[in-house]
Image (cartoon, helix red, strand yellow):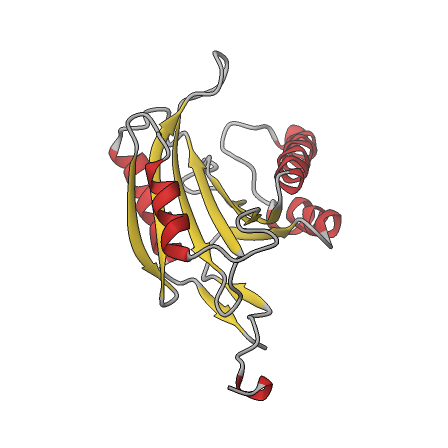
Amino acid sequence: MSTADLVPPPRRYELVLPPGWVRIPLREGMNEALEKVLFSHMAEVPEGIPRDDAMRFRLEMRRQLEKQARAARRNGGLDLYLPVLPRGGIFLMASFIVAELPIGQGHAVPPQAVLAQLAEENVPGGTATTIDVAGATALRRAYCSALGEEELPTRRVDYVIPVADDPGRWISINFSTPGDGDIDSEFTDVLVELFDAVVGTFKWSYE
């Protein structure tokens, strides 16, 4: 096979987002994206917040979003996705992060070995299954987490996906939600199903 026959790696990925969700890039343009969320997407505020407190609410949301975005970037995050428009007068508490994974750096590890190792990692009460994402075998892990006494329990779903035509490179898509406060409720299940549907639209772009 000649060099001309080799398929170049994808330049980026694409996802179809639900209405009201936005992407915040974490490498470049993060501050601009946060400002856009604050002043363009958050024209509405939840029911029960007085009009005079609307700007204070938006500024507090901006602070929380920036804190979340910077933490995600420190952990290798590429993009942060979250809902910014209220549904039925409330804001959904959910988000997911697309990140690079430090797997096989310096040498390519067979994908099957990587997936097998990750599937064997102990996640109490969790499940790990292989699934097709963008034409490749990926890993889906689902579990619950409570990180501290003051934090709400959360439902978490992680996808680990090999980068097409680029052996040794992987990304993860990590979803987290406390749902409606009951991580076993039907409402929380719907949010998880929504995330799975979003991942189902994942594809690589070579443009």
Residue 110 is situated, as x and y percent measured from the top left of the image, at 42, 57
Pick the residue in front: 3 or 41: 3
For the image, the number of numbered tags is 0
Residue 73 is situated, as x and y percent measured from the top left of the image, at 66, 42
Above or below residue 57? Residue 131 is: below
Pick the residue in front: 126 or 2: 2
Residue 104 is situated, as x and y percent measured from the top left of the image, at 54, 51
Q: Residue at x 44, y 41 (%)?
A: 175
Pick the residue in front: 116 or 53: 116
Q: Is residue 191 visible?
A: no
Q: Residue at x 66, y 49 (%)?
A: 26
Q: Residue furthest top?
A: 149
Quarter of the image with the C terminus is: bottom right
Q: Is residue 76 visible?
A: yes
Q: Residue at x 36, y 28 (%)?
A: 144
| 191 lies left or right of 12 | left
Q: Quadrant of residue 65?
A: top right
| 33 lies left or right of 146 | right
Residue 91 is situated, as x and y percent measured from the top left of the image, at 48, 37
Pick the residue in front: 63 or 109: 109
Q: Quadrant of residue 16?
A: bottom left
Above or below residue 51? Residue 8 is: below
Above or below residue 76? Residue 199 is: below
